[in-house]
Amino acid sequence: MQNQILIVDDDPDIQVILKDNLEIDGYFVLVASSGRETLQLMEKSGRVELIILDLSLPDVDGIKVCETIRKFSDVPIIMLTARDGIADKVLGLERGADDYLVKPFDYLELSARIKACLRRHSSQKIPSGEIIYFADIEIDTEKRIVFKKGVNVNLTVKEFRLLLFFVGNIGKALTREEFREALWKTSDLYTGSRTIDVHVQHLRAKVEDNPSEPKLILTVQGIGYMLDAQINRPTVGRSDRSHT
């Protein structure tokens, strides 16, 4: 089955160039010219594997569109923009984008990034229906929600991915480079930034009893972070409980 890609850009020339090249590469392509149209297509299509999202749209800023999509989907998003400042790139990635490409760009580079995003996203697919338990945390992988002591902690998509990455590497000291590669794939944009630290802090605030004295997600000086192996080892099962 063809991968379905959604192009979001209000420039007709870019729409045509990208659509023609992507179709030559074997993708099925949808096109939207505004943020509103993007969300409508996401709802109607039912299956979009990747979004190429321009930052400057006529109705809603691309950052806002990305944030809205991240409330209900972890579909890979590659942002396109004429802005080349590091701060703008980091902002886009912090709001949920998986990659960032500055205009003008070479289609071959975009093509390579698309393939990398699709490959990595596919490798991170979570088995549907499994419930992961550790400490007082319950992760419902089918509904993509997390409970602490039975209460929904309402994680963002990025925080959910981060928590699963920790669980899959319990007891291992993870470097910031490993987080960047696994969750953002664009480590060159994070030089000197505190993006990883900020996301870890946000996650701690939701899963720790006392975020200022974390017992689950530990800081490993000089390396990064680790999910403490002394807590109950994660177990996988199924829950008959009905969550609301």
Image (cartoon, rainbow, N blue to C red):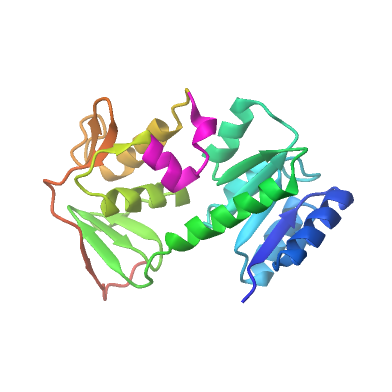
| Residue 189 counted in the magenta span | yes
Give the residue at x 48% y 56%: 120
Is 27 situated above or below 155?
A: below
Queried whether the magenta region covers residue 71, the answer comes back as no
Task: Tell me the residue at 65%/48% (across/down).
Answer: 65
Q: Which residue lies furthest to the top in this view?
A: 192
Q: Where is residue 91 in the image (x, y as percent from the top left)?
A: 58, 33
- Quarter of the image where one finds residue 93: top right
Q: Where is residue 175 in the image (x, y as percent from the top left)?
A: 33, 36
Hey, which residue is sitting farthest front in the picture? 108
Frontmost residue, 140 versus 83:
83
Q: Nearer the viewer, residue 111 or 38?
A: 111
Q: Which residue is drawn at 30% across and 60% down?
A: 139
Q: Position of residue 19 (x, y in %)?
A: 79, 60
Kindly identify the residue that appears in the image at 75 percent across and 34 percent down: 82
Q: Can residue 1 be seen in this view?
A: yes
Q: Position of residue 222 (x, y in %)?
A: 27, 25
In the displayed structure image, the side of residue 18 where residue 66 appears, left or right: left
Which quarter of the image is occupied by the N terminus? bottom right
Is residue 74 rendered to the left or right of residue 241? right
Q: Is residue 178 above or below residue 36?
A: above
Q: Is the magenta stretch mostly helix, strand or loop?
A: helix
Left or right relative to 128: residue 2: right
The magenta stretch spans which residues? 177-191
Note whether residue 97 is visible.
no
| Left or right: residue 118 compared with residue 223 | right
Q: Among all residues in the image, which is located at the extreme right? A: 13
Please identify the quadrant where the C terminus is shown: bottom left
- Which quadrant holds residue 203? top left
Report the number of numbered marks.
0
